[in-house]
Amino acid sequence: MSPAKRGAPLENIIIALDDSEDSWLAVVYAGERFARSAGVKITLLHVLPDLPPEFWDIGHFLTPAERKARQRLIDEWEKTQEKKWTSLVQKAKDYLVRSGISASAVRRKFVPGIGDPATETVTEARKGGFTTIIIGRGGVRKGPPPPLGGNADKVIRQAWDMNVIVAGRRAKRRGPESY
């Protein structure tokens, strides 16, 4: 952490959220750690998947009408993705509120995935002026868990100017349905 940010307050928090158990543990950590904390603000961030190939550049210049039609399709696809993830994000918000965090202090945000989720998370945190990122430890390979998953490692390396909390445990895992 840079000397200018040393001791930065934790109250403006972004939680990277997907459907993994480790991501849910980040929500649980925030609920336990920041319950009834005055002034805390939490944003639940979900990075939408990359655009499917049919929305990519097709190799010719588009007319204004074609650009407009493609953008309309992309916007519809993003809305469909948001609807798909809304229930998980709402479940996370409900958990945080039950934990003691004010409902008005919890927001949600969906961003289209252009790069990898780690970079998108750090970019959104910087754009939003967040002081803290909470992420799950990650790692999806079989066998013993790695020290950190790829996204957690990337966030730590890229968010050198913010507080980063990596939540997770090696004990028995529980998903959002357990809470």
Image: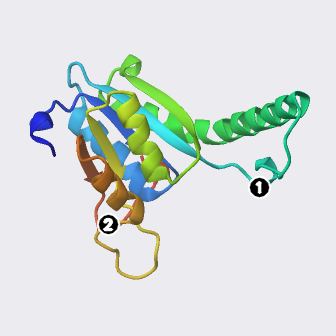
Q: Residues within 10 Å of mark 1 (few under 14, many from 20)?
A: few
In this view of the protein, which residue sits in the foreground, 64 or 112?
64
Q: Can you see residue 85?
A: yes
Q: Is residue 16 left or right of residue 116?
A: left
Element at label 2? loop
- State how far apart marks 2 and 1 are (Cα): 30 Å
Res 53 label: 1
Q: Is residue 3 left or right of residue 55?
A: left
Q: Is residue 26 left or right of residue 3?
A: right
Query: Residue at coordinates 20% horizontally, 19% vertically from top-left?
Result: 38
Q: Determine which residue is flagged by label 2.
A: 148
Element at label 1? helix
Q: Amino acid at mark 2?
A: Leu
Q: Amino acid at mark 1?
A: Pro
Q: How is the image coloured?
A: rainbow
Query: Residue at coordinates 35% horizontally, 50% vertically from top-left?
Result: 135
- Residue 174 in percent (x, y) is at 41, 58
- Residue 59 in percent (x, y) is at 83, 52
In this view of the protein, which residue sits in the foreground, 25 or 148?
148
- Residue 158 in percent (x, y) is at 32, 51
Query: Residue at coordinates 32% horizontally, 66% vertically from top-left?
Result: 148
Q: Can you see residue 178?
A: no
In this view of the protein, which residue sits in the foreground, 32 or 121?
121
Query: Residue at coordinates 60% horizontally, 36% vertically from top-left?
Result: 86
Q: Nearer the viewer, mark 2 or mark 1?
A: 1
Q: Quadrant of residue 105?
A: top left
In this view of the protein, which residue sits in the foreground, 111 or 146?
111
Furthest residue in direction bottom, as rendered = 143
**Up-down relation of residue 68 to residue 145 (above or below):** above
- Residue 79 in percent (x, y) is at 71, 33
Tag 1 or tag 2, which sits nearer the N-term? 1
